[in-house]
Image (cartoon, grey):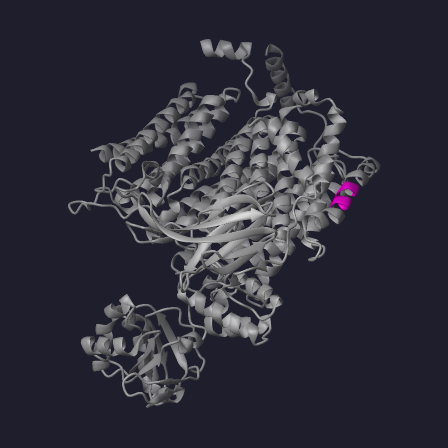
Amino acid sequence: MNRLALFAPLAVFLVLSIFLFKGLDRDPTELPSALVGEAFPAFTLLALNDGRLLSEQDLKSQVTLVNVWATWCFACRIEHPMLNQLADQGVGIVGINYKDQDAKAQSWLEQRGNPYQFNIVDAQGSLGFDLGVTGAPETYLVDAQGVIQYRRVGVVDQRVWDDEFKVLYEQLVGKQK
Amino acid sequence: MSIRSLLVNSLMVFALCATPYGQFNQQAQLQASTDVVIFSDPSLRERYYQLVAELRCPKCQNQNLADSNAPISKDMKAQIYSMLEAQSTDDEIKAYLVSRYSEFILYRPQVNSGTWFLWFAPLCFVLLGGLVVWRYAFTKTKASSVSAKLTAEQQAQLDKLLEKDSAQ
Amino acid sequence: MIAELGHFALIIALGLALMQSLVPMVGSFKGYTAWMRLGHSLSYGQFLFIAISFVCLATAFWLDDFSLKYVSQNSNTQLPNQYKISAVWAAHEGSLLLWALILAGWTAAVARFSRPLPLELRARILSVLGAISVGFALFLILTSNPFERLLPMTPMQGSDLNPLLQDIGLIIHPPMLYMGYVGFAVPFAFAIAALIGGQFDSAWARWARPWINMAWVFLTIGITLGSWWAYYELGWGGWWFWDPVENASLMPWLAGTALMHSVSATEKRGVFRSWTLLLAIFAFSLSLLGTFLVRSGILTSVHAFAADPERGVFMLMFLAVVIGGSLMLFALRGPAMQKVASYSGWSREAMLLINNVLLVSSLTMILIGTLYPLIADVLELGKISVGPPYFNFFFVPLSVGLVVAMGIAVFSKWKATDSKFLLSKIPLPLAIAVVGAILLPFVLGDTDSGYSVTAGLTLLISLWLLATIAIDLKAKIGTDFSRLAKLSHSYLGMQLAHSGLAILVLGVGLNAAYDEIRELRMAPDDSATISGYQFDFKGVNPVAGPNFTAYRGQITVTKGGKWVANLFPEKRQYNAGGQVMTEAAIDPSLMRDIYVSLGEPLSEGSWAVSLQVKPFIRCIWLGGILVGLGGLIAATDRRYRRRKTLLENKRAEA
């Protein structure tokens, strides 16, 4: 019995190393959204270009990519061409202009192209706060019932689209039909 | 510094403790300065500092809200402030933030089925240790299984060692 | 050219380490004296070549050789010279080279100072140390080469050393800490050698003890320095954050403390043999685990080095071999736990057992808390955080228990303590402690705020411990202080270290009870009063430093009309990288620190200023230093010092 007890530390270490090994694949800074599976938060904010009033109901017609962006966000410039490309392919994209200024945002879009069906002006960041946004860019995949299905923190490029969004997006679109 | 002066310093600390030297813990009397964050009630200030120390900045490399200047930290601190002023309880404030930013922002993990090991294992360890102390020190065991007499080999070893020792 | 020389020296050191890990070990089995003796020269040789490698890297920094990737990432032409040198260990590759250097240094020290040990044991110890060196040298050469060149696109200027590291703290804290971390490799090697040879008795314990003590002293001082550095460098007045990297240093320290106490029982009475061996393995294993956690990117921390999965895998394999191998060896050849000698109730052995239980419970709790975010993530339980509220929740009561037990242990005797004797000793120190705990908070605190329970509890346990130590000292020397010198170093060191811990606890508790922090909006000529001190804000001026520009505030502190200090907190922006840093201004004293730092600039020339009065905080680091000093004194006890004997002189001549 005593001899067996001496094996206990080794056993504990082996279990520990399995966790450590699995942990190497994980990114400790990656934070999944608390809102996955929840309804998109309620809001009443203005649209960027035409000043009409928007609410969460406007996201319930189709499967949408909700992209949080701002002109002060450097990575958003890198992401933008990809969004343009996705919009050309028919993906519905809605923007949240996060803590930004209308005039700057409008000219930014004129310069770089506008993939957004419409843009929600979130000057105070209140919608962002309710979404759990920590910065820009962030992209949410929202289904036709207005439920958040996935969130990506950081730039969406071709690889990210293929690995993380594409399959789920197509599934949701299929379900909608 | 010599050992003696260090000992003297430590004794000095002890002695000074007994001297009516300092008046600590006075309420801050503000002449022309105001708090950066102004509360309608001093007890709210206590709770505010407690909360911002216990909540984690979601964007930083392991910092609490108190120590962080990230924009999201500032937003969260502002939210906590307004909720405190609106008479919300600490639990309500935490629940509000957790529903948006997930449990990640709690430096004190919740006690649930996912964390029972985290919260109960240390206690189990101490109890296990207590059991060990009890068994080894406080219970009368049978006579030791190790014989008190030396085997022939051990005796030879002993003689060799004694020889070496006497030569030194 | 110099860098290539350094690289080459590293490879030679690897070769020597490889030989060192094999030749003496084989020699110990075959009885080849020459092979066993070779371990010594190989150790010295390895140290020499790693030192050459290290000097080459330092030279590259000194000469601003930005063609070296590591230098360009961590230095800058404007960097003050002393930081250019300390930048050598500022990041992953260089600090690993420091690790290897210090390991080689300890190995050479073992070769030099372990003559009393039998040659067989010495040879095996050096071989084990050599094997560990092989691991680190391979890690350096294969995955973390500090001599990697950036050619042909050599930058004209480096990225600069992180401003937080441009400080004396970087010059002393990591080397001290590594001396401790790495130092535990020696008791580890002792344990492995003992397991291989099958000899683990009092003699082994006596030989191992000074090495355990010295490693522990360095680690104690290293951790104390780290805490002090974080306090004045980070700008918000905290001194311990339960950050994974801090925990990674505290865990080996706790294991090392438990080891130090357990081995004393093994030396004196031959008990706890398996446990001492296991602890020796644990202490170094935790050092290695800490190294892995900090450098693999597996945990988030402000201190963490840049992560690289390739490095993580290598380190994990190294860990598996070293820790797994040693624990396997322990399981197969460790002494079965029979009771070698008996001890009862409140004997010193029992008290040491309690000490070990409390220390190891703390250690396990910290390990679980630090790793739990990882465990929860792997088990798909979500991303959770474990922070100070968790660690303090368990650590405080465990420490309280430890301090109380320490006081009782002062009066315990080996093998058995008469419980009547023990009970007779308790009332006096207890009375002192209770009286102090009831009365002093009223003196120290403000009558308006009432009695501070935290302060009372802190005073209760600290005064209890200090009183028991004072009573025991008095019993030994009466009032004749000259008799202090006649007491053994072991005893003196122990009492000093324990007193240091009491002072540390005093500092922690009283500071927690009486700390005052206010964040105020201040414009020029505004003032505020906190804890009896008046702070007059004189405004902010722009200044320029050697490699930064700054806003420097001026605050005059007075108390009851008398001038106390002029403080100049700064908000710096570094030229090279543009990073903004807060430089706090501190007026230190044993009774209280006054701590001031600038926050954000607000409207109309006013600033957000953080004003803090922190009573007794310096006792924390004073206590830590005393603990380390106590250990140092104990390590120089006469029974560890070599006595040149007739027999050994004969051997030397041979």
x and y, in percent, of residue B24 in the image: 64, 51
x and y, in percent, of residue A2 in the image: 63, 44
- Quadrant occupied by the N terminus of chain C: top left
User: Count of labels shown?
Assistant: 0
Q: Residue at x 66, y 32 (%)?
A: C495
- Quadrant occupied by the C terminus of chain C: top left
The answer to whether C421 appears left or right of C204 in the picture is right
Q: Quadrant of residue B49?
A: bottom right
- The segment highlighted magenta reads C431-436
x and y, in percent, of residue B125 in the image: 63, 52
Q: Residue at x 38, y 39 (%)?
A: C135
Instruction: Decide which of C533, B136 is in the foreground and name it.
Output: C533
Q: Residue at x 59, y 40 (%)?
A: C590
The answer to whether C489 appears left or right of C545 in the picture is right
Instruction: Decide which of C502, C261 is in the foreground and name it.
Output: C502
Q: Majority secondary structure of the magenta segment?
A: helix
Q: Is residue C80 above or below residue A167?
A: above
Is residue B162 one of those drawn in magenta?
no
